[in-house]
Every structure is written in C-alpha cells, then in structure tokens.
Amino acid sequence: MRHVSHLIIYVYHLKKEIVMKKNSKFLIFNMILLIVAFLSASLLSQFKSERAYADQTEETALTKHQKGEDKQNPKRLWCNEHGVYEDECYICHPELFPEGNTIRDPKRLWCNEHSVYEDECFICRPGLKSNKSEEQSAGLYCKEHEVFESECGICHPELSNSLSIGQGLKIRLESPESAVKAGIITNVLSRGETMPRFTVLSRVIYNQNRFAHITSLASGIFQKVLVDVGAFVSEDEVLVEIASPDVARIKAEYLTALTNKKLKKLVFEREERLFNKKVASQHEYQRARAEYEIAKNNTNTTRQQLLNFGLSEDEIQEIEKTQTSTSVLPIRASFSGTIVERHAVVGEFVKPGNVIFSLVDLSTMWLELSIPENNLPFFKVGDKVEASFNKEYGINKIQGFITWLASNIDEESRMLKGRAVVKNPGAFLKHGMFGEVQLLSQNYSKKINVPAKSVQRLDGRNFVFIKLSDDLFEARRVETGESDKENIEIFKGLSPLDELVVDGSFTLKSELLKSKFGEGCAH
Amino acid sequence: MNKIIEFSLKNRIYIILFFIICFGYGVRTIFRIPVDAFPDTTPIQVQINTVAPNLNPSEIEQQITLPIELSISGLPGLINVRSISKFGLSQIVVTFNDETDIYNSRQFISERIGSVELPADIDRPKLGPISTGLGEVFHYIIRSTNPERTLDELRTLHDWVIKPELSKVPGVAEVNSWGGYVRQYQVIVSPESLVKHNLTLESIFKSLEQNNHNVGGGRIVSAGQSLLVHGLGRVTTVKEIENITIKAHKGSPVRIKDVAEVAIGHEIRRGAVTANGKGEVVMGLGFALMGENSKKVTQGLKESLKNVRKSLPDDVMAEIVYDRTGLIQDVIKTVKHNLIYGAILVIIVLFLILYNYRAGLLVAMVIPFSMLFAIMGMHELSIAASLLSLGAIDFGIIVDGSVVMTEANLRKLREKQGLLKRTLTSTERQQCIIESGKGVIRPIIFGVGIIILVFVPILTLEGIEGKMFKPMAWTFIFAMAGALGIAVFLSPILSYYFLPGKIRIKEGFLERWLRTGYDFLLPQVIRLKYVLFGTVLTLLFVSVFVGLRLGGEFIPRLNEGTIAISTIRLAGVSIEEAVDYNSKIERLLLEAFPDEIRHVWSRVGTAEVATDPMGIELTDVFITLNPKGRWKLAKTQAQLARSIDEKLSDLPGVNMVFTQPIEMRLNEMISGIRSDIGIKIYGDNFEELVSLSSKVQNTLMKIRGASDVAAEQITGQPTLKIKVHQDQIARYGIPARDVLDMVESVGTRHVGDIFEGQRRFSLVVRLQDKHRTDINTLANTLIPTEHGHLLPLKKLAEIEETDSPSTINREWGRRLIKIQCNVRERDVASFVQEARHKIENEIELPEGYVIEWGGQFEHLERSKTRFMIVVPITLMLIFAMLCFSLKNLYDVLIIYTGIPFAFIGGIFALLSRGLPFSVSAAIGFIALSGIAVLNGQILISTIHNLKEEGLLLKDAVSTAARQRLIPVIATAVTDAVGFLPMAISTGVGAEVQRPLATVVIGGVITSTILTLFILPTLYITTGKQRFVS
C-alpha cells in the first residue's frame, strides 16, 4: 500500500514538474499566437532573447558577489553559525565584547545595573538612545530592537540555552504602550520572610515505646477476663485471671517448702542447742544445718518461681497467710494505657508467651515519614513538623518533632524513612492513618517568594521577566525552590529591587519566541 | 437562414405566444432560484474527524490517522488526501474531483472507515458536515447576565435545547457548538487513598464500568399476559457513583467515595469563545447544506433562534453576531446596481443613437427577456444567482443582435418611406423588414454565435476558477442564446408592429455628428494609411511589452464587509491564557473603534465538530461592522482594516493576519494554505524537515518582495514524556499498564456515560489536581500495584520535559512541512519563478524528500495551463465560425485583425487602472475576442452585399462603412456602457468583475476604432491587389 502511494506521489510530482516548465509565460504564448497570425515571429524571439540575456547578466553579477563574500582567510577560525570570524563573533564569545574586558575608564560613571558606562546606558537614560552605543558596537547592535545583539532575545532566542542563573535576554516590545495593551502587570518585590514547606507523606503508628503485648508466663485456662478492648487500664491493674495447674503446683510446692523450711529450722535450732551443750555430735549438727540451708534454698527457689509467674510479694504473703494453693494467676497491666487488642476468652487454653492483650499508651503517637530523596537535606532530627490529615478525620494540625531519620534509603521506594513524635490528645490519631507532614523549618527563610504564574519554563529552565523600561523587558534565568499553589520561591537570580512581571509573563515568553511562531495555518 | 425572418413574420402569432409562455415560465423561476453571495468554489470534500481527548499528536498519527488514511486509498475520483494530527484530534480531508457525487463519496468513505481498527476507548471517526466553504452562514453567542450561571450550564442549554431546535431548520447541515464547558462526571482519585486501601487504578476503572449498565431481560409470560423485564443498574447521580463498591475487605466495603471525590466537572477543552470583551461565552455555528439557498437557510435559522429564545431562562441571551443575509443583501445590491445602471445606460445610449424612442424601447425589451432566459437556464443547471452569475451580465452585449436587426429594419423602412413618400402598407412593411433582415441575419447569427462560442471553452476550466466563472459563462450563454432568439425571431415581428408607421426622415443629431465626423475622417485615414499601420504596429508592440510587465494575480479579493483576524501564539499556550488575551484584544478594539465595530468575537482552538482543526495557539478574531454611515475613523473597509492593524500591531506575543470569514474558510478548505505561496516539503523525518524548512526560509527571505515568510509552527509543544522503564517494571513484576493507567489518569480516562434524562454525559476518572499541576508531585506519586509494592512513578518511568511536534501534517500519506510566504509590491508569478530557481540551485534535497509549490499561486499556475489550451481553442473556434460564415479566408483574416487590436485596448485599460492580470481579466479577454469580430463581420458582410450589387471595391468599402457606422457604434457603445457600472462599482463583491469589465471596455473602444478606420483601410489597401490579380 505504502509503495503504491509513494509511486502516486512521484508520478504526481513528475507531472507537475513537466507542467511547470511548459507554461513559463502564459502571456507570451498568448501574444505569440496572435502575432504569428499577423506578424513575423522573429521580432518577438529577438525581444525574448534580450530579456533572457538581461536575466543572465543579473544572475552572474549576483553569483560573483556571493563568491566574493565567501573568500575567507584560511588562517582564522570561521564561525559558521553567525557568519563572522570566530574571534569577531561576540555572540559566541561575549567575553570578547569591547566593554566587557577593557579596563574601565575611572573618570566615567559606570552603570552597574546594565554593565555599561552611565553615559551610554540607554536603559537608565532613554534620552541617549541610538547615539553612542550604536556607533561603538556597530555590527553587534540590534537596530530593530535597540539592544545589543548578544542580548536580543527576539533575534536570538536560542541564546537562552547558554544563560547562567541571574543572566538574561532583553525583549524589546513594539511600542511603549504594548505592555499596557497586553495587560502586563509588574510588581516591585519586597524581601519576605518565608517559610518553605516541604510536604511528605506520613503514616500514623503507635508509639512503639509505649506499646506492650500482655502475655502469660504460665500455661492455663482463662478463668476470668476483667477488661475488654478499648478499656483504659492503670498500671498493675489485673486484666485477666488464669487458672493454671502449674501455678497451683508451684504454690503447693512453695507451701510445702515453707513448712519444710520451718521444720528444718526447728531441727537445726534444736541440734545447735544440743551441740552447744555438747550433747549432740558435730556430725548431726552439721547435717541439720545443711538440711535447713537446703530447705531455705528450696523455699526461695519456689518463691522465685511464683514471682516469675507474675505474682507480687503481697500475693505470696497472702498465700503464706492463707495457706491456699489456688490455681488462679492474675495478669496485670505493665503500664497505664488502653487495651487495643484482646485474645482472651474464658475457658481458652493459653500457653506461655501467647499474647493475651495489646496495651498501648495513646498519649503520644509516631508519624512514619517517607521523605523523597530530593528533600533529604532539609530534614534533621529535632526539626519541628506539622501534621495534617484528611478533612473528614476532623483533626486539626498537630505539631511534633522529628526524633529519628533512617540511616538507609528504602531500596524500593527510594525514600528515606523518618519518625516524628506527636501528642495525641483525646486519642484522635489512629494507628494507620495517612496524612501529610510539613516541615516547619527556620533554616531557609531568606528567599524571595513570587507568584507561581510569573515563572515560565523554557527548555526545562526557569525564567522570570523583569521590566527595565516601558517597552524593554528582560527574561532572566532563576533558580527556584519549593512551590505551593500560589507562590514559588526563587533562590537565586532575582534582586529584591527588580520590577517583576507578575501578570502576562506568557505573553512575554511568546514575544521572545516569536520567531518560532509561523503563520496561522490550519492544515 | 434568410427564410427565418419570413417564417417568423408569417407565424408571428405563434412566435409571440411562444415568447409569452417563456416569459411566464421565466417569471415563475425567478422566485425559485437560489441566491448566494459568491459562487461556491469548494471542491468536493469529505472531512473525517476522530476525537481522542488525551492522545498527543504522534500517537494520534500512529494510532488513528495512519490506519484511516490507508483505508481510504484508492477510492474512485480521489484527487487528494491530506491529514492533520493534533492533540486530541485527527482530521483527514479527502478531496474528490468535481464529477464525484458528494453523497456517494461519503458513502464510500463510511464503508471503508467502518472496518478500520482503532484503539478501543476512543470514539469512532465521524464525517464532517455536508457543507462547503460558504456553508458557515450563522454565528450566535449564548451569554447570561447572571454571573452565577456557569459556562457548563450555558453549553448544556445550547447542546440540548437550542441546537436540536435549530437543526430542524430545512437546509441546515450542522449546528456546531464552540466554547463553554462540556459537562462531565469526574471521579477524582487520590493516589494516597489507593495506597491506603491497597487498590489499583485498574480496579476503580473496572468497578465503575461494571456498575453502570441497564439491561433488558426479554419478557415473562404469565397467564396470557407478557411482562417486559428491565434490569436497572445505571447510576445517575453523584451520590450513586460515590457509593459504588470497589471491593469488600473483611466485610467492610470500600466505596468510590473512600478513595475519590466525585464531582461534576468538564471535559478537556479544545476550544473557547470570547465575545465583545466581556469574557467567555458559548457559540453556536449554523452550517448550510451543500447546494442550499443560503439566504433561506440563514433566515430560517434566525427565526428558529428567535422562537427558541422563549424557552430559555430569562437571564440567558442568544445573540446573533454574524449571519450571511447581510452579505447576500449587499451583494444583491451590487448586482442590482450593476444591472439597473447597466440597463439604464444602455437604453439611454440606444435612444440617443437610434434617435427613435420606439426602436429604443423595442431593443431595450430584449433586456428583461434575455434575463428571464438566463434565469431559466440557471435554474435548470442549479446555478445560484450570485455576483458572478447574474451580476456579470452585460446588457450591452446582449442587445447587440437586436440593435443590428432593429437598426437595419428602421433604416430600410425609412429608405422605403423616403422613396415612396407615403406611409407604407403592412405588406410593404413586411417586405421591407424581410429584406433588411436578410442583409443582417447572417452576421447576427454568426456574430452572436461567436460570442456564445467563446464562452464555451470557459466551461472547461477547472478548480476554483472553474467554479467561479463557469456560472458566469453559463449565464452569459443562456442570456445570449435568449437574446439571439429574440433578435432573430421576435425583433422583426416587433419591428413590424411597433416601429412607427411614419418615420422621421431626418437623422438624429448624434447620428448626424457622427456621420459628419466619420465622413471627414475616413478619407484622411485612408490617405495616411502607412502612418496608421505604423502606429498600430507600434501600439501592438508596446502592448505586448506592457502585457508582459503586468502583474499576475489569481482572483481578486472579494470584499465581504466583515473582518477576520487570524492570530497565532506560542504553541503550548493554555486556553485560559488565550482567552484572557483575546478579551483584552476585544476590549481594545471596542474602545478604539466604538462607532465602527458592531460585534467582535474570538474563537480559540476547535469547535465540537472540528471543521477547521485549529490548535489552541490559533485564534480567529471576527469583527462585524456597523453600517458605513456611522463610521467616524475610516471611510472604506480597507482603510479600517489598516487602522485596526495599526492599533494591534504593537501587541506582544502574538502574530496576526488580516482576512475575511469566507475567504479564510475557502482558503483552508482548498489548499489549506492561507498565504500567497505555500512551499511543501515532503519527507519522513521530522528533524530533517525542520532543517530543510529553515534553509528554504532563509533563501526566500533574501528574495525581493518576500514578506511574512514563516514555517508553520509544527514543533514546540512542551511535553512531559513519561517513558516506562521496562527493566524496572520487570524487576517488580508490575505490568506497564499499571504505570500507564496512572499517566492516563493525569488526563481523563473514560469509563462510561451518565444519563440525565435524555442528556448524556461522560464519566471519567482522573487524578487530583495537585498531581496534575506539579511535575514533582506527579513524579513522586505512589503507584499502587496488585502485589502491594508502593513505588513512586519516577522509579518506574523516566520523566522528561521536552518539546514535541504540536501538529503533524500529512498529504498523500507522507509527512510534510509547509512554509508560507506572502508577496508584497511584486506580482506573485515572477516571484515564484525566481524563488523556485534559487531554491532548486541552492538547496540539496536528501533522498526521498520532495519540494512542492502551492498556495494561491498554485491556482494561477493551473489556470494558466488551462488557458493555454482554452485560448487557442477559442481563437480557432472563432476562426472556424468566421470561415463558415464568410466562406472566404481573406475576409476572415481581415476580421481577425480585430482581436489583437482589441487586446491592445484591454491591456492598456488594465494598466491605466493599475489592475494585475488575473483569471478574471483573462475571461475578459476571451469575451473580448468574441465581441471584437462581431462588428468586423457586420462591416465585411455589408461590403460583400454591396460588391455583389456591382459597386467598385473602394466605393463598396466606404459606402458600407458609412452605412454600418451607426450599428457599429451602437453595439460598441452599448457593450462598453453595459459594463461601465461594473467597472466603477465599489459595492460589496465588485472586485472580481472589475478587471473583466475593464478589459472589455478598453478592448471595445480600440476594436471599434479598428472596425471603423483600419478595417476599411486595410481592405482597400490589400483587397485591391487581389482584385487586380
């Protein structure tokens, strides 16, 4: 199909070509026809050849002229782009520009703003326009736009690629009224104390330092569950009672050991008295003493076992007092907090280490931050942050501090994990909530905030437009920082005294790139 | 042939009856004939528009334009296929040759594109309205005084209330909406909440698609009664959409409202309209069907709009800003002016020369009769009454035959009366008329026949010039045929009845003066014959020289009485920016020209049905004007356009071209090039094309006369390229679709339709604004995947800000770039010759790249080629006719001398008025060649008659010359004055005929001098030798 269509095009062109050559002059043909009817054709042909000759001479003159221009000095480098010798090409080599590298005349005032002598600065003194500066830099001055060729943005928009931050190109508008007509509005900047806000994603999690899983050390059956999920418990409050044969056994053992200890103690005391009276043998005395020590030890060991099950001293004393060896084991809260999870059901068997409850102190929460790589330098441990959440949560902004930043970047998401602690009054924050965290930093406040619509992008670089005079503007490359919906901050390239174009910057960008427009054409 | 007069005199009742019937029929057709401003020059064209709201130009080209182009190749009658791929829109324009029936070709195309496979989620291609370049007859704007009313509501009102009403008007091809917001139900997803619920975008698309259907369930029959089963699952409100469940997690459903906000928003806009500096409005455009009476259609639309106003809310106003009736009325005024003044002038001249009011009236009667004949013919061929058909009739030429006939009759009657010295009897009168008729009938038939004949080759013209001048040629042919019939059949009868019984023997004073002068001059001229020949030859040379120096122009610009400014901005401008700026321009204009401008409105981008696929960077500003009487700052439209240009020229950031609505539309449709010259470079590689185009531009700019040299802005669309990293997605096992879903949702992803009663709106999914406005946020957007990975977009794709093509143009399946250029202070033809030569020499084309020349000049070139064939054929036809008539080669050659001599006058007339050579002038020359031989023929045939009567050569010549002085002068002067109003008219649309009329007037003057002086001299000088030998 493609081949066929190509063929059609070729044939079509060929046909056109032939037709074009044939009908060079319709009028000539027309006249020839008439005159042949009446007159000899020779006169006309003579006339025609004369014309042709005239054309020819004109043409040769032209080519000669061109050839003369093309003769170049082979020893000097030629700038093909701009059609002058490289060492004369001030567009490629602005450092060669006369004003730029010569030592300044100390007797003349220097205009720092526009880098020319004050008496040549037609920007500051429009009255000087087209006098000296034009003559001095003859071929380099853009007469159409009345700026230096190397600064003329309209003639050389491509120069915008080589500008460094803070440099700019001039844009001369058609007339002083142009800007007003186009609705270009400028504003003198004022240095503002600004609070750049970096926003990162965050997730609310429990403060892991105040989070506990309540477990039992003994196996047994839940006998009584005293609290439920959501209950607030204070420290050492009994949460659940477990009927544990182990506990009962140890208790019994303990009581036995106690009794045994008492007995052995009596034996020992008696033997000691007898020994002192030299009634008993040393052998017997020593045996009684050893047995007493063993019994004491045994008591201590079982007592420790009871303690290990979570029984308190009081409870042990209670056991001693009551001499009961019930199997009930109370489990207590390790700190005051809220029960957030419960696995205990009465009658269920529990093994040591099984989580019975999760207990958490909700007075503070952690925010888990995911910080993009490019924002890393701005985040530090101890920085103040402000967390905000979806509206429907009904939570106001909450402030807190960064307490930890990870030492590694997450391999998959290319983000740095961080942590901030925030207070959680009324326990509004829930584990797993998503939110945003903004960094409230004092460190980067000396910057200029400009309306976001005043910054234009050109080949991926940022530009703002500065008004120099009624019809002269400058497109200046700047470095930008963070932005929100309305404002964008400028790190570098703007002076607070500049008159910034806040409305109509696209119009100026268009004017700068006017050479790329083309005619309005639909197809 | 001689018997014709005898026959008609004998059957005069029947003949009169026949003409009366014709008259009645003609009067009847007057009221049926369509009326239009200009002849329609649009070729047979079908537009295929495909809308894909989110796709960028290269994807549009690849996925839509290319397959459609391939599918339509090889249709019968196809002469051109060109296409344009823009953001969100593909348009293919298929042009057929003029013989093709538009309805057939549309049928063919529909069949072909029905089988084209296109991406699933875009609309099917649609054919553009069956309309022409003249079809855009009606613009109105919908605005509201209530600031609360949104553009969305206005657009909805227009689309669902006004539009259906206007579409009912007979002859309306399409009512198009432009601007406003098209309502759309949007599900605005926040990527964070997707992460939260571990959902993918895909699952949202799916749930929305699956939860929005109605079905039919056949019917249930029970106990003899059947119930229809109707399953309803369509969502209709925002609330219902919000409650659609995406998935259930442990018994708790996740609904749309948990992850997204549902809102009524608007579609991505491709166009907007602002009016009178008061901000955005909604605009409606009415298109007339091809071949319809646009005056009627416009009036119908106007009335319909008036009716529909009643059903609109009180604060909503529908205001007509442009309608074609105004222009048509203006043109009709021009036509009337031309015809009425032409007729009056012709009649006055007739009275003066014939010096007999009855004879004058008798001849003048031909005018309405031939008009009716012309109208009958036009009706048969469905030619609209327009400036170039009816408006181009020259009554002077039409009356020629009757003038000659009546004058001969009058003379004979007078002679006879003088001889008999009494009033003639009716038999004698009859006899007289038969006799005198016999003498002139042959030259009349052949003379008028030749004039008819020279218009025949014009019928073979092609393209715009054909469409423009064929109606004129037909009209002329019909009118002339009618006039010939009257001259031959009716004039003798009328002479018989109405010429006075008692004729004053005395000649009219004018006749006497002329005769005296001629009697004095002719012998002098014959004596100084060699001086005369010398002068003539010199003049001939000078005119050839001058003719070569005359500029070339295709067709003169028609004045429409409305100004359009097509403006262009930087590619990538936002609608809001463009709208703002346009309002500023409008306010500026209204402030500066409060008395002159009636309405001013601007159209940005494209309409709903993209009849002209403009990008957002293109705006057409329309200006309608108040009646000239109220103007204060300018006198003519050209002057006004100049001062508007001055006012706007210093606006930064925008380029403007001044044109007119119809002109703009025609240019777009015909070649797609609005400038004088368009150079097309074909090739495949975009960069290569751009570099070639800059070379060509540089070359062009160096040529004298070049202005507004510019390449089309086809690049420079800032683009955010998001390229999926194949190895990354492979590592995480994520399908590219997951990433691309996210990219797609930056725009909108269509997932179904929502019905509000009968009104249907689309339901789309898109991301939150912050992810669509800031590149960084977008880059860091987390992509939820089925496997639960959470990865930012930039990890999976390369994100890059680049420039990309804003428009991709193709012609005959190849990419091309166009360079436009206007020519100032120089004629286009010579400029093109020089430019072509230079470009051929200086620029080397890579293999497979082709340069082609087009634009306005293209038509000039084509018409020249055609004229090269047409003109010789015309001359040969005349020659053949003359040979047939005179049966004497020598006489034919003598008469033939009239042609070059007439041309001298034509050329000098053009020169003196500073008009360039154009198609219009060429037609004038063709007509002139017919007119020029008429008089010569009359003279020569008289000489023949006299010689047969036995007179000597010299006596025969001078007697014949004196005898035929009056008819020759009468026909010549009527020819000239008939065209006079046309030549000097300044009315709307008079520009086209001005060169034609000028050429004819100039040519007639010189050819009359030739007939009266040089022809006899030449005849005597050369004829003698022949007789001696």
Image: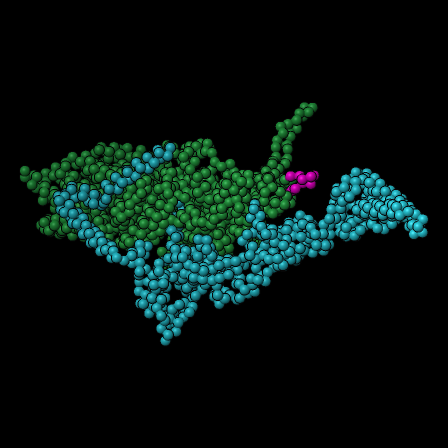
Q: Is residue B249 magenta?
A: yes
State the residue in front, B179 or B633.
B179
Is residue B909 or residue B708 the one in the foreground?
B708
Q: Residue furthest bottom?
A: A107
For image coordinates 59% across by 39% down, the residue present is: B786
**x and y, in percent, of residue B875 in the image:** 21, 39
Question: Residue A463: x percent and y percent?
Answer: 46, 58
Task: Residue B958: say if magenta.
Answer: no
Q: Main secondary structure of the magenta part?
A: strand
Judging from the image, the colouring scheme is: by chain
Frontmost residue, B456 versus A135: A135
Please say if A65 is above or below B764.
Answer: below
- Which residue shows up at 21% across the image and 47% down it? B903
Q: Which residues are magenta?
A: B247-256
Q: Quadrant of residue B947?
A: top left
The reply to whether residue B510 is visible in this rendering is no
The C terminus of chain A sits in image quarter? top left
Chain (cyan): A
Q: In the image, residue A316 lies at what x, y percent?
A: 85, 48
Farthest residue toward the left? B1029
Chain B, chosen colour in render: green
Residue at the spot x=38%, y=61% of the render? A151
One can see residue B841 in this view: yes
* Residue A428 image position (x, y, % from top left): 71, 52
Q: Say left or right for B494 vs A511.
A: left
How many numbered discs?
0
Q: Residue furthest top?
A: B224
Left or right: residue A465 versus residue A286 is left
